[in-house]
Amino acid sequence: MENSVIVIGAGPAGLTAAAFAAARGLQVTVYDKNAVPGRKLRITGKGRCNVTNACTLVSDLMENIPGSGRFLYSAFSRFMPSDVIELFEFLGVPLKIERGNRVFPVSDNAHDIADALTKYARGCGAEIITETAVKSLVIRDGAVCGVKTADGKTREAAAVIVATGGVSYPGTGSTGDGYRFAKAAGHTVTPLRPSLVGMETEAAVWRKAQGLTLKNAAVTVYRADNRKEVYRDFGELLFTHFGVSGPVILSASAHLRDIGTQKYILRIDLKPALDDKKLDARILREIAAGPAKNPANMLRTLLPASMVPVIMELWDVPPGSQVNKLTREQRQTLVYLLKNLESPITGLRPIEEAIVTAGGVSVKEIDPKTMQSKLVRGLYFAGEVIDADAYTGGFNLQIAFSTGAAAGRAVLDS
Ligand SMILES: Cc1cc2nc3c(=O)[nH]c(=O)nc-3n(C[C@H](O)[C@H](O)[C@H](O)COP(=O)(O)OP(=O)(O)OC[C@H]3O[C@@H](n4cnc5c(N)ncnc54)[C@H](O)[C@@H]3O)c2cc1C
């Protein structure tokens, strides 16, 4: 009993914590409500799992964590991306590095990562009990002494690590139970917000392009009040029934932390490879090649078909006119529209659709070296349940691994 640890949640944070604690000779039991460990891990990176980011400095990691980077300094320093890479290669999962230092398994199969981590935790001696949900923590005299499971049983332990994840993609098991446990233990849970999520946009005309994917759009987000730019990047963008999504939009969303109080505008450059002058020259070439075409037909040579009605609605030219009759001003308006398609952002999509949950158990109440609660003895937190989230690129899983390792190394170490 005095060396027994319960881990709630068999995600990347819980499995890492369990492996590290069990490797120290502690008696570790992991409970997960799902039938299979690492359910969310198995769908990460579109099924390929961007397992970490091969950056080498702690400062690089911290730059990708808005808000709680400093809290993670110690956990990162002691379990870096190089340690994650070494661990998986040691576990027989060769890895490769792609654009932006993103690390993936060579197999492009997230199951390889989840299976290896599960096997590692078991190999270190942890017992993983699936299809068993924890209902509450048992706390006595300021110390945790076990958990109650859904079957009504009390399971005793000298320490408990809460690694229940956030509230995003609840179908994977992360339904926010850890926040409830933390609150009941007296912890502060900072407001939960969606991050890495689609954006709802005001411009109704964009809906005409619903379903269209732009492989390489240039995206800028700026504040409506002072036009200060908060995000700019290239990437894949998808027009949807609610607005926009796709990798570049998800990344941008992490920068809109005050969207409830602040207004933002999204600008899309549909022709990022051409500056205004070159784009005008290109339009002139298209006009010369088909002078009798109407504007929509000419646009079809420049844009994906479903973008044409969007631009036609915004570009104030008679649909039946001939393109060789366009004025210089009308051409300039077209150049402007193609490079500055703009809409106010009316909000982010719901947290359930977000890749990560921002907010969570306040880092002020957790010891950054050990992940132990400062309020309840023997209680630890690891992973997304903590108020720490990152941009895309493998950083969120690195948070899970580093905080899991910190908790697993420190639990019952006194
Ligand atoms: C679609 C998608 C793609 C992603 N891709 C990437 C990527 O490529 N790279 C990256 O870095 N990050 C990615 N992320 C984010 C990353 O998956 C999470 O940040 C990470 O899984 C968090 O790990 P965790 O262990 O804290 O929580 P989770 O992985 O959510 O694990 C928590 C576990 O706790 C269990 N649990 C919860 N409550 C209870 C309870 N009461 N009793 C028992 N068990 C319980 C759940 O069943 C779950 O298995 C992605 C997320 C999503 C949704």
Image (cartoon, helix red, strand yellow):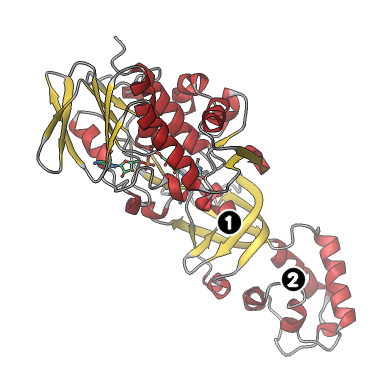
Q: Nearer the viewer, residue 106 or 203?
A: 106
Say whether residue 145 is left or right of residue 224. Answer: left
User: In the rendered view, would you say 337 is above or below 236?
Assistant: below
The tag on residue 27 is none
Q: Position of residue 264 (x, y in %)?
A: 53, 52
Residue under numbered circle 1: 266
Say whether residue 346 is left or right of residue 89. Answer: left
Q: Amino acid at mark 1?
A: Leu
Q: Looking at mark 2, is its residue's CB closer than 8 Å to ligand 1?
A: no
Q: Amino acid at mark 2?
A: Leu
Residue neighbourhood size for the residue with mark 2, other residues' Cα within 10 Å, grouped as few (<14), some (14–19), many (≥20): many
Residue under numbered circle 2: 334
User: In the rendered view, would you say 198 is above or below 398?
Assistant: below
Q: Looking at mark 1, is its residue's CB closer than 8 Å to ligand 1?
A: no
Q: Position of residue 319 (x, y in %)?
A: 70, 86
Secondary element type, mark 2: helix
Residue neighbourhood size for the residue with mark 1, other residues' Cα within 10 Å, grouped as few (<14), some (14–19), many (≥20): many
Q: What residue lies at 68% left-to-right and 73% top-to-bottom? A: 304
> Residue 37 appears in which quarter of the rendering?
top left
Q: Quadrant of the C terminus?
A: top left
Q: Position of residue 171 (x, y in %)?
A: 33, 54
Q: Are marks 1 and 2 in contact (CB under 8 Å)?
A: no
Q: What residue lies at 52% left-to-right and 33% top-to-bottom? A: 88
Q: What residue lies at 61% left-to-right and 62% top-to-bottom? A: 342
User: In the rendered view, would you say 397 is above or below 300?
Assistant: above
Secondary element type, mark 1: strand
> Residue 302 appears in which quarter of the rendering?
bottom right
Residues at marks 1 and 2, CA–CA distance in whole angstroms: 18 Å
Q: Nearer the viewer, residue 231 or 133?
A: 133
The quadrant of the picture showing ligand 1 is top left
